[in-house]
Structure formats: C-alpha cells, structure tokens
Image (tube, helix red, strand yellow):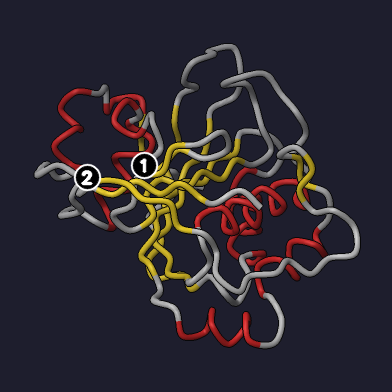
C-alpha cells in the first residue's frame, strides 16, 4: 500500500501505517472507489494487535460539516448522528441553520450543522466511514454544488494539513462558506486555523452571513 503523505506546519514526512493489515474478503478500495460497508468496518477496526493499537492511539479533535436539502432535511441530519460509529465520539453539536444554496442557486435551501468529534481513526479511514454513511442514508450522485440528500465534509483533523487525490484538510472552501463558519464559530469560537495565528471566526467578515439563519421548525 502506498504510504500516506501527511503535511504539518513544520514540514512534511511520509508516515507508513506500521503493522497495519486490512482484513476484508472483497477489495474495499479499488482505484479510490468504495466497495462495501463490511470492508469499511474491518479496515477501520482492524483485528488482534491492530485493534489494540488503535485503542491506545491519541484521539484527535475533528470538525465535521453536515448538509441536506432533499427529503426530510432535519431527519437526515439526525440520521447522520445516529449512524456515526462507536469509534467517533460526538463532543459538541451546533444549532441547525437554514442556508440559501451556494454555487448553484436553482435548488431548495439547505439545512447545515457542524459537529466536533474525537476519534483515533486515521483521516482516510474516517473519510471512508462518512462517505459510506452518505450512501447508506441514500445519497445519489449529483453535479457539483447540486442538491443532495446528505453531505458530510471533514473540515479539520486536529492541526494536520493533508493534500492528496482523495482528501484535502482543512477543507479548501471553509473560509468562503458562511454556512460552515457560522455554526463552527458557535461551538469553537477560539479555534485557530492550522498553520496560522488567525481564529476561524476572523474569516466571517469576508463572507455574506445574511444567507444563513437559525432553523425554525
């Protein structure tokens, strides 16, 4: 397996997954495509020593962005919370906000929420989990910025900066999106953007916050 490239503020290094053997009968990842939920579970949890290693790993503080503008939008967000695995501990939930569409305007308004969670799962393992949750809830392929039943983005993973074919952390459009910044500021007003001395809340002045409002049932 190709080593995982992880970039930090002080430089970069290549960190192979030591003593890590994926255990699934059918290929879980084939040219970057997700294959099966059972494969995800065995990959993320591991067996034997790998499972024990994960239990002793440091848990990182991670921020997830949730969105939905199809079907029962509020129920879709709640379903994401119920589908998160035991390996992902929810620390805080923002309020739910209603947001005008972003990027493509001819579609229903979105409901958005941000979660802070802790997990020992590696970034790419967490990505596999959340993308399979989307599929399990019923998300279908759509065009960029188009309508979706549910959308789950990894915003921050501790202070790591990761850039590869499948994952960009921090999420590259955080600072452009009021529907991310406003709920993020609610639960983490002093969060510092990695590799800078700026609080995430500092970026709010550069976006139009009028398109986001508290959701009222």
Residue 45: name its quadrant: bottom right
Task: Tell which residue pokes out farthest to the right in this image.
Answer: 25
The dot on residue 69 is none
Mark 2, Cα crowd under 10 Å, few <14 / some 14-19 / many 20+, is some
Nearer the observer, 105 or 132: 132
The dot on residue 193 is 2
Q: Position of residue 1 (x, y in %)?
A: 66, 53
* Residue indicated by mark 1: 170
Mark 1, Cα crowd under 10 Å, few <14 / some 14-19 / many 20+, is many
- Compute the Cα span from label 1 to label 2: 8 Å
147 on left or right of 39: left
- Determine whether the residue tagged by mark 2 lies in a helix, strand or loop: loop
Q: Are marks 1 and 2 in contact (CB under 8 Å)?
A: yes
Q: Position of residue 180 (x, y in %)?
A: 37, 39
At a point 45% along the width and 52% down the height, the residue shown is: 64
Vertical placement of 207 versus 34: above or below?
above
Nearer the observer, 87 or 58: 58
72 on left or right of 164: right
At a point 57% along the width and 74% down the height, the residue shown is: 87
Vertical placement of 112 versus 212: above or below?
below
Mark earlier in primary sequence (1, 2): 1
95 on left or right of 203: right
Residue 23: name its quadrant: bottom right
At a point 45% along the width and 24% down the height, the residue shown is: 100
Q: Position of residue 190 (x, y in %)?
A: 15, 55
Nearer the observer, 3 or 187: 3
Q: Position of residue 42 (x, y in %)?
A: 75, 70
At a point 66% along the width and 48% down the height, the residue shown is: 131
Q: Tell how many labels.
A: 2
- Determine whether the residue tagged by mark 1 lies in a helix, strand or loop: loop
């Amino acid at each position: 397996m190709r080593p995982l490239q992880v970039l930090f503020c002080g430089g970069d290094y290549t960190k192979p997954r030591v003593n890590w053997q994926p255990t699934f009968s059918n290929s879980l990842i084939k040219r970057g495509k997700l294959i099966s939920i059972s494969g995800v579970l065995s990959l993320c949890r591991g067996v034997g020593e790998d499972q024990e290693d994960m239990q002793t790993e440091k848990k990182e503080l991670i921020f997830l962005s949730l969105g939905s503008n199809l079907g029962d939008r509020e129920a879709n967000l709640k379903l994401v919370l119920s589908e998160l695995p035991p390996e992902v501990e929810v620390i805080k939930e923002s309020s739910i906000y209603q947001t005008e569409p972003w990027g493509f305007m001819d579609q229903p308004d979105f409901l958005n929420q941000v979660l802070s969670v802790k997990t020992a799962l590696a970034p790419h393992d967490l990505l596999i989990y959340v993308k399979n949750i989307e599929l399990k809830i019923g998300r279908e392929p759509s065009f960029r910025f188009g309508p979706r039943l549910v959308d789950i983005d990894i915003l921050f993973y501790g202070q790591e900066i990761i850039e590869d074919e499948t994952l960009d952390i921090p999420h590259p459009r955080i600072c452009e999106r009021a529907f991310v910044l406003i709920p993020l500021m609610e639960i983490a007003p002093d969060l510092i953007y990695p590799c800078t001395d700026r609080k995430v809340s500092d970026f709010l002045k550069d976006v139009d916050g009028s398109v986001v409002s508290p959701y009222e049932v």
